[in-house]
Image (cartoon, rainbow, N blue to C red):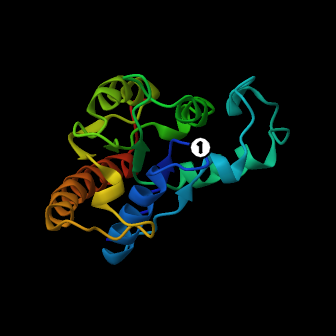
């Protein structure tokens, strides 16, 4: 069944490598027949969090937030692509995620983390996992860490190592399972 799974990119740096991972995952999701729109804070130029989307009077939220809320409400899951900055998540990612709350509820998330070094950003992923659970979009048990991202993916997001395609396949199989299960449960109602 086709799903809507936004890919939320976490970096706004001019030379960000995460765009490679986002492009790779979008291609993988679209090859499965899913809709995978990119949520890019650099393109969206989201304001620094002053008020959450829900704190604006109805119809008065900035258009960029209204558009994201509409996308998130029709989404079945989320893929979050995070770098590791000082053993934590990038500030742009926190800002992007923190604008919303109820729009994430009862939908799973999956974390793709990356780094230029050998650990693939997993220290940031551990903090991100706690944050996503608090937002109401708990992450699936598996991660997709991409070490040495500059060598693992080219600028267009094409995998340069065979292992990455296999790992992404298992990762997205798991996310799809959770997304379909929670979609079926949401159709019958939620606890609140």
Residue in front for this viewpoint, 117 or 29: 117
Dot 1 corresponds to which residue? 13
Please provide percent x and percent y for residue 42: 65, 48
Asked which quadrant contains residue 180, the reply is: bottom left
Please provide percent x and percent y for residue 184: 31, 54
Task: From this view, report whether residue 63 is shown above or below residue 128.
Answer: below
| Residue at the image point whose x is 54% and y is 34% from the top | 97
| Residue at the image point whose x is 68% and y is 28% from the top | 52
Relative side of 166 to 53, left or right: left
Q: Residues within 10 Å of mark 1 (few under 14, many from 20)?
A: few
Q: Report the number of discs.
A: 1
| Residue at the image point whose x is 38% and y is 29% from the top | 128
| Residue at the image point whose x is 33% and y is 77% from the top | 31
Task: From this view, report whether residue 133 is shown above or below residue 3.
Answer: above
Please provide percent x and percent y for residue 104: 48, 39
Residue in front for this viewpoint, 116 or 55: 116
Q: Which secondary structure, mark 1?
A: loop
Relative side of 153 to 44, left or right: left
Asked which quadrant contains residue 143, the reply is: top left
Please provide percent x and percent y for residue 32: 30, 74
């Amino acid at each position: 069944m086709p799903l809507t799974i936004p890919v939320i990119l976490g970096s706004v740096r001019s030379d960000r490598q995460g765009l490679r991972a986002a492009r790779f995952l979008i291609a993988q999701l679209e090859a499965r027949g899913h809709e995978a729109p990119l949520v890019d804070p650099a393109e969206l130029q989201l304001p620094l969090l002053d008020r959450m989307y829900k704190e604006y009077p109805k119809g008065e939220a900035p258009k960029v937030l209204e558009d994201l809320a509409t996308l998130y409400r029709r989404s079945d899951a989320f893929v979050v692509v995070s770098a590791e900055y000082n053993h934590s998540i990038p500030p742009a990612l926190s800002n992007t995620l923190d604008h919303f709350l109820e729009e994430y509820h009862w939908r799973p998330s999956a974390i793709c983390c990356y780094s230029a070094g050998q650990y693939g950003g997993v220290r940031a992923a551990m903090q991100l996992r706690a944050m996503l659970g608090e937002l109401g979009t708990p992450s699936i048990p598996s991660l997709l860490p991409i070490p040495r991202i500059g060598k693992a993916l080219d600028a267009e997001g094409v995998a340069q190592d065979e292992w990455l395609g296999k790992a992404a396949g298992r990762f997205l199989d798991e996310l799809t399972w959770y997304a379909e299960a929670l979609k079926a449960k949401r159709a019958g109602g939620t606890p609140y």
